[in-house]
């Protein structure tokens, strides 16, 4: 069903509303004549059937409402995981500034490469519901630079502890994001319950006695339309990294821009310092 969640918002809305509308009209055309030819309305009038319809819609509203809230909560949590990882990258990049130039440059280059990897490689895979296989290969280069450094002064020891803490927070946020990609979708059983409740509510409209097919179809569509819209909202929000409503990689792009800006400034400062050092002997 990956193709279903890869549809855009408008495409998914058209698909869900179109299917529900088609099934509703088909049901009225096939079931309503049989109901009118039976003796059902000798025992139950439209008022009784309308009461049954109201009860069914109420049950569906509660179930669908709770499901929609849960789906939206999963989407918000996934966005928080992404923001947390982007912030962890920025914090670790800043903390590495207290290390010697060689360690700092190696670690920061690894963070820049990792952020680019997330944006250019991992994110397209997330949008297909897939997970990367060698996701930590690049970030381990930063780990090697951090772990291999042995602080000599008390200040360096304090900085090293903070860097290790920031690195662990980055790893934790990374795994939380991957878990959000893999485990936040609604279970199939819950989808079955929501769809069946909606189908039962719409089907109860077929039992109404309405002599005009157009009026009967109109009443049925008035009941089916809200159900279709709720199903659309649940479907479009079900997978946080896929579909029309999804988590954006914008936090990573913002962090990457800032890291590249800092790297550019440091490169310019290093070039100016080198030029000044070369000019001093000439004087």
Image (spheres, helix red, strand yellow):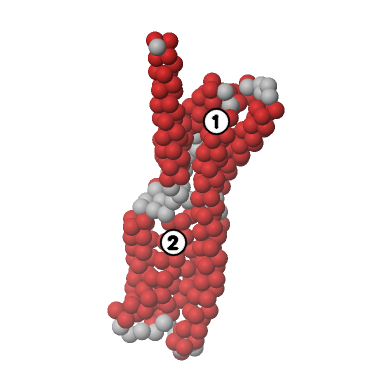
Q: At 51% across and 66% down in the image, what residue appears?
A: 64
Looking at this view, name the residue that lies furthest to the front.
283
Q: Is residue 196 visible?
A: yes
Which of the pair 261/241 is nearer the observer?
261
Quarter of the rendering containing residue 233: bottom left
Q: Is residue 134 visible?
A: no
> Dot 2: what SS?
helix
Compared to residue 218, the image places residue 126 above or below, namely above
10 Å crowding of disc 2: few (<14), some (14-19), many (20+) = some
Quarter of the rendering containing residue 250: top left
Which of the pair 262/130 is nearer the observer?
262
10 Å crowding of disc 1: few (<14), some (14-19), many (20+) = some
Which of the pair 225/82 is nearer the observer?
82
Looking at this view, name the residue that lies furthest to the top.
282
Compared to residue 35, the image places residue 232 above or below, namely above
Q: At 32% across and 81% down in the image, what residue appears?
A: 215
Q: At 57% across and 34% down in the image, what residue appears?
A: 95
Mark 1 or mark 2: whose residue is earlier in sequence: 1
Q: Look at the image and tell me in which quarter the C terminus lies.
A: top left
What number is the disc on residue 97? 1
Quarter of the rendering containing residue 85: top right
Q: Position of residue 227 (x, y in %)?
A: 44, 69
C-alpha distance separating marks 1 and 2 = 45 Å
Which of the pair 43/164 is nearer the observer?
164
Q: Position of residue 243 (x, y in %)?
A: 41, 51
Compared to residue 176, the image places residue 45 above or below, namely below
Compared to residue 208, the image places residue 168 above or below, namely above
What number is the disc on residue 144? none
According to the picture, the residue beneath numbered tag 2 turns out to be: 233
> Dot 1: what SS?
helix
């Amino acid at each position: 069903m990956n193709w279903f969640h890869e549809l855009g918002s408008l495409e998914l809305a058209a698909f869900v509303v179109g299917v529900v509308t088609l099934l509703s009209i088909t049901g009225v055309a096939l079931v309503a004549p049989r109901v009118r030819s039976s003796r059902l309305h000798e025992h139950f009038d439209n008022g009784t059937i309308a009461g049954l319809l109201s009860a069914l819609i109420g049950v569906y509203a509660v179930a669908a409402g709770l499901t929609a809230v849960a789906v939206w909560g999963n989407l918000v949590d996934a966005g928080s995981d992404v923001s947390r990882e982007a912030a962890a990258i920025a914090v670790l990049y800043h903390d590495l500034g207290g290390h010697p130039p060689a360690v700092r440059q190696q670690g920061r280059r690894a963070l820049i490469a990792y952020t680019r990897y997330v944006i250019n490689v991992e994110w397209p895979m997330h949008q297909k519901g897939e997970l990367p296989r060698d996701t930590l290969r690049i970030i381990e280069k930063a780990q090697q630079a951090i772990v291999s450094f042995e602080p000599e002064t008390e200040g360096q020891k304090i900085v090293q502890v903070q860097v290790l803490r920031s690195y662990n927070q980055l790893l934790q946020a990374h795994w939380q994001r991957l878990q959000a990609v893999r485990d936040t979708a609604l279970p199939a059983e819950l989808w079955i319950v929501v769809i069946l409740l909606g189908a039962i509510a719409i089907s109860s409209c077929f039992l109404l006695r309405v002599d005009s097919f157009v009026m009967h179809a109109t009443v049925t569509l008035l009941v089916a339309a809200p159900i279709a819209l709720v199903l659309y909202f649940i479907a479009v929000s079900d997978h946080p990294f896929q579909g029309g409503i999804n988590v954006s990689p914008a936090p990573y792009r913002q962090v990457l821009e800032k890291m590249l800006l800092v790297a550019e400034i440091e490169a310019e400062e290093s070039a100016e310092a080198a030029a000044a050092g070369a000019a001093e002997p000439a004087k």
